Amino acid sequence: LTTRWRDPHVALPGNPEDALIGVMYNGRQPVDADIVIEDSSSWVFADTGLERGSVLRGLLGYEADRMYGNAPAGTVQLAHSPYRFGQESTEYSDMTVYQAASAATVFAAGTLQWSFGLSDISPWSPSPSRLSPAAQQITRNILARFIGERG
């Protein structure tokens, strides 16, 4: 059976994905937009030069995730990115981070296109590069936290 965690199962109740990772897929695709930074004071953004309102161009999509109100206590909304889906109203995608009771750090970019900012290799060649030094530094910061190099 392939299903979403939030969907009720035959013998189990559904559990929303955002209760574990902080965000949840909204079911709308394709998306191709920008990530808009909300809380630049987080350690996630150290050494990036990003400020509230800064934009990471073209890194939001193909799918987008957002907070739905089930995120664990202490979840920080790092980015809150508006985008249009078809002719419908404005939707949002969120980037989050929190520290679990186990002391594990849980980061969710809220996008599948995050990797586009990490390498100059295009998934749809030829297309413009979406390489982002800021996204590369954010990834360094997160990985350093995961392995215990940053307090």
Image (cartoon, rainbow, N blue to C red):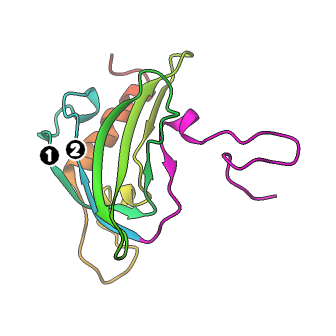
Q: Residue at x 43, y 57 (%)?
A: 64
Disc 2: CA contacts within 10 A as few (<14), some (14-19) or many (>=20): many
For the point 34% across and 42% down, which residue is it?
Answer: 139
Q: Which residues are magenta?
A: 1-30
Q: Secondary structure at mark 2?
A: loop
Q: Quadrant of residue 151?
A: top left
Please report contact status of discs 1 and 2: CB closer than 8 Å, yes or no: yes
Query: Residue at the location (35% across, 73% down)?
Result: 122
Q: Relative to 118, is 103 above or below?
A: above
Task: Answer few, some or many: residues within 10 Å of disc 1's Cα (few below 14, many 20 plus, some between 14 and 19).
Answer: some
Q: Which residue is mark 2?
A: 37
Q: Residue 74 in magenta?
A: no
For label 1, the residue is 53
- Most extreme residue toward the front, as rendered? 89
Query: Would you place residue 27 above or below residue 72 in this image?
Result: below
Q: From the top left corner, tell me how far across and down residue 43 is, in percent.
A: 26, 27
Q: Amino acid at mark 1?
A: Gly
Check residue 10 for magenta coloring: yes
> Depth check: 48 or 51 in front?
51
Q: How many marks?
A: 2
- Horizontal and vertical percent for residue 50? 14, 41
**Lateral position of residue 47 relative to residue 6, left or right:** left
- Sequence-earlier tag: 1 or 2: 2
| Whether residue 50 is situated above or below residue 56 in the rendered picture | above
Identify the element where label 1 is drawn.
loop
Looking at the magenta stretch, what is its main secondary structure?
A: loop
Query: Residue 140 shows which numbered tag?
Result: none
Q: Amino acid at mark 2?
A: Ile
The Cα atoms of the two marked residues, 1 and 2, are separated by 5 Å
Residue lying at the far bottom of the rendered structure? 126
Q: Quadrant of the N terminus?
A: bottom right
